[in-house]
Amino acid sequence: MAMIRGRSRTDTSGNQNDSIINQMQRIASRYTPRQNGLVTGLQDFHSLRQALNCASADQRPLVVISTKTTDRADVEKKLKSLFNEDEIIGKFHLDFIDRRTDRGWQAVIEGADRDSGILIVRSSQFGLNGKVLQQVPLDADTAKIKQALLKANRDFAQVEVRKNYEQHVQAGRRQRIQFENEVSNDGAIDNRQNRQRRGRR
């Protein structure tokens, strides 16, 4: 799990997961959707740095999209339907490269040899960089993108080892790795004044 200040996900047993899922389903059952068959929007992080960190924490492959503004709508159209399919939904994180925020992004992703494309990335142990598992061009059809996603997910599952939270945190501290998150332990914005008051951890 990536080193994130604030609330982090710990490994839980299947029974605990089932209990949480059941509680969420009970809450969701109280509400009626306003539309049927509503397709959700696509995920996009504030930065590639944040995306790599979250992908490491959740131990999911990260899909990185590098595209010109004029091409983005076409790519989003293909991905919206694809990322709502049962075989894909919930298995990946997704981030669109921002040319200002993510300047020089290729330097932190091994194997990113093109300026544009759809890259499926395995984030490093602490989410500081990543490595390309699969890469397809932006003009690839949905079937080809899906094939690449499924293959990358299989490859990812073969090499990714479930992290022990305590051991992971200790290893990060030994290497002096710390990720400053905008959200604090209580869910509020973690501004500088609050961080100084609580002390750096």
Image (cartoon, rainbow, N blue to C red):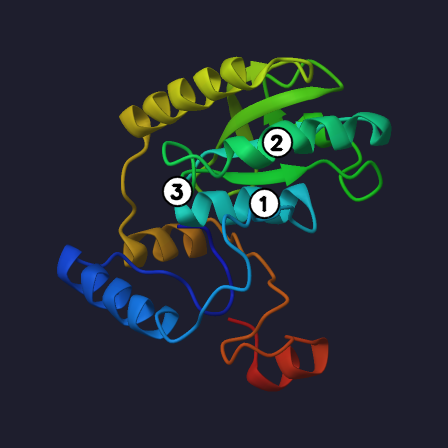
Q: Which mark is residue 170?
A: none
Q: Who's the residue at 61% across and 61% down the image?
A: 180
Find residue 41 and report its horizontal and vertical position in percent. Answer: 61, 47
Q: Are marks 1 and 2 in contact (CB under 8 Å)?
A: yes
| Residue at numbered disc 2 | 64
Category of crowding for the residue at label 1, using alpha-carbon neighbours closer than 10 angstroms: few (below 14), some (14–19), many (at least 20): many
Q: Are marks 1 and 3 in contact (CB under 8 Å)?
A: no
Amino acid type at mark 1? Ala
Q: Nearer the viewer, residue 135 or 141?
A: 141
Q: Residue furthest left?
A: 15
Find residue 91 and report its horizontal and vertical position in percent. Answer: 40, 39
Is residue 175 toward the left or the right of residue 108 in the image? Answer: left
| Residue at numbered disc 1 | 51
Nearest to N terminus: mark 1 or mark 3: 1
How many numbered badges does the structure rendering display? 3
Nearest to N terminus: mark 3 or mark 2: 3
Q: Who's the residue at 43% across and 52% down the image?
A: 172
Category of crowding for the residue at label 2, using alpha-carbon neighbours closer than 10 angstroms: few (below 14), some (14–19), many (at least 20): many
Find residue 67 and report its horizontal and vertical position in percent. Answer: 76, 26
Per the image, label 3 sits on a secondary structure element best described as loop
